[in-house]
Image (spheres, helix red, strand yellow):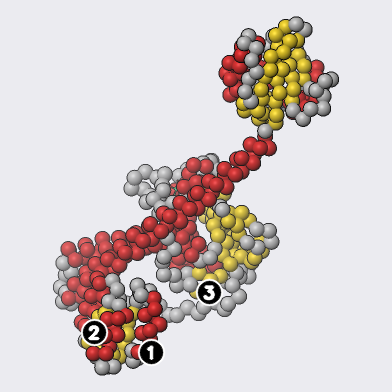
Amino acid sequence: MPFGKATEMIFIVCDGQIVYMNDTGLKLLGASYAAELIGKPIMAFIHPDSRDLIRKRIPQVLEERKRTALIEQKYLKLDGDILEVEAMGLPVLYRNLPAAQVYARDVTKRKEMEEALFRSQEQLRQAQKMEAVGRLAGGVAHDFNNFLTAINGYAELLMARVQDGDPVPREIAEIRRVGERAAALTRQLLAFSRKQVLMPKVFELNGAVTGVSEMLRGFLGANIEFRTSFGENLWPVRADPGQIEQVIMNLAINARDAMAEGGVLSIETQNVVVSEPIPVGTGQVPPGSYVVLTIADTGCGMDQATMSHLFEPFFTTKEKGKGTGLGLATVYGIVKQSGGFLLVESEKGKGTTFRIYLYRTDAEVTEEAPAKGRETLSRGKGIVMVVEDQEEIRNLIVEVLAMQGYTVLGAANGDEALRLSGAAKKNIQLLLTDLVMPCPDMSREMRPRIPS
Ligand SMILES: Nc1ncnc2c1ncn2[C@@H]1O[C@H](COP(=O)(O)OP(=O)(O)OP(=O)(O)O)[C@@H](O)[C@H]1O
Ligand SMILES: [Mg+2]
């Protein structure tokens, strides 16, 4: 055989039939003997996607006697699997008849590498998009939240002016109600963009799951079976327990919505030691000790397109009014801000599993302080300096403190605070200041100069 040892597949087609095939070709098409291919119509080995292309190229070789360009196409192996090749044909004579000699190279490996590269670029693009959307949402939500604090605060002040026993005017009550809803929405956006002020504690996850389970049972509906499985001697974790409960709720509500026909929702906690890094998105869960919270449903599952937008704020497949698309964005932000990892597995029609990896901590579990009821503000006297750059917030704080009997000095920045404190002749008893101020050096400067 003249071409027996070639690394390319080489074959000759005459009158629409395979008349010669080299060893590489036999191997690639999955044949043990030449007789399995010789005499067979070539079209039987061409994938339907490539048949039109080949039909166009045949006259070029046989009639025009021209070689064709190297082009990617799909062949079919004997067992029906696809063989991706790039191939070209040359005009030859076979037993004095016009024929085509075809050279084809297996490109499956290269294709796989190209696809892997494409996937990793796609993941990177996705991660960058999340970062950008997060910055945008966070920026807007942060400023908006400040305005809302002022709006809600003034509404609160107005309500406080209503005499005991008198009804609160409906308009004020409405401002408060809508203001609270707006605040809840901005909190979700802040959570997504990881700009939320968390109150981390060391706690045990089983307690959080038990707490939420009570509530969950109530609204899951009769056709959903709810199972819990609590890991024994669970390691403590450091996170904001209220936020973790929020995570469980959001995931459980999604699970319920995915099981309109009924199914099983299971929540599981477990100590897990990761010894090999687990890939997730563009990063990985590094080796270490984790407490893993798994929330799984047997619902409708998701296709690839849904999965690729899952954590974007305002991405929802639910009809208008049913979902805001902020549930998973919030979950994503909380888990990230807690230093944890979020893994999703889902298949259309086969349910969905979310796994949250939180680092094990060796710190002692934080004791719960007894919950305080709503207190009335106590009155006092003395001079308080309020340093806050956001004017609306500063005015509100000044007003509230003044109402309670304090003399208040409001300053927009460190410079102004220093000037005012000089004029007040060291009589300031308390400094109330924003944590992050536009002029970073001042945070250090101010401490020793202003008397406590
Ligand atoms: N467990 C699940 N099974 C199937 N699809 C899911 C599941 N969880 C989320 N999804 C899909 O992801 C989308 C986004 O979920 P997300 O929680 O962010 O928003 P939402 O549930 O649509 O609205 P919101 O939570 O704000 O009320 C959903 O609309 C749904 O298509
Ligand atoms: Mg949701």
Query: Is residue 149 positioned above or below 82 on the image?
Result: below
Q: Residue at x 33, y 89 (%)?
A: 450
> Which residue is at the front of the view, 27 or 425?
425
Which numbered disc, 3 or 1, marks the residue that appears first in the sequence? Answer: 3
The reply to whether callout 1 and callout 2 are in contact (CB within 8 Å) is no
Instruction: Name the residue type under label 3.
Output: Val
Query: Is residue 160 positioned above or below 71 on the image?
Result: below
The reply to whether callout 3 and callout 1 are in contact (CB within 8 Å) is no
**Residue 352 place in picture, x, y as percent:** 54, 48
Is 328 left, or right, of 360 in this rendering? left
What residue is pinned by disc 1? 448
Marks 1/2: CA–CA distance: 20 Å
Nearer the camera: disc 1 or disc 2: 1
What residue is pinned by disc 2? 408
Give the number of callouts. Answer: 3
How many neighbours does mark 1 have within 10 angstroms: few (below 14), some (14-19), or many (20 or more)? few
> Which residue is at the front of the view, 306 or 118?
118
* Figure quadrant of the C terminus: bottom left
Q: Residue at x 51, y 41 (%)?
A: 303
What residue is pinned by disc 3? 202
User: Residue 50, located in which quarter of the rendered image?
Assistant: top right
Mark number for residue 337? none
The secondary element bearing badge 3 is classed as strand
Q: Residue furthest top?
A: 96
User: Residue 78, located in which quarter of the rendered image?
Assistant: top right
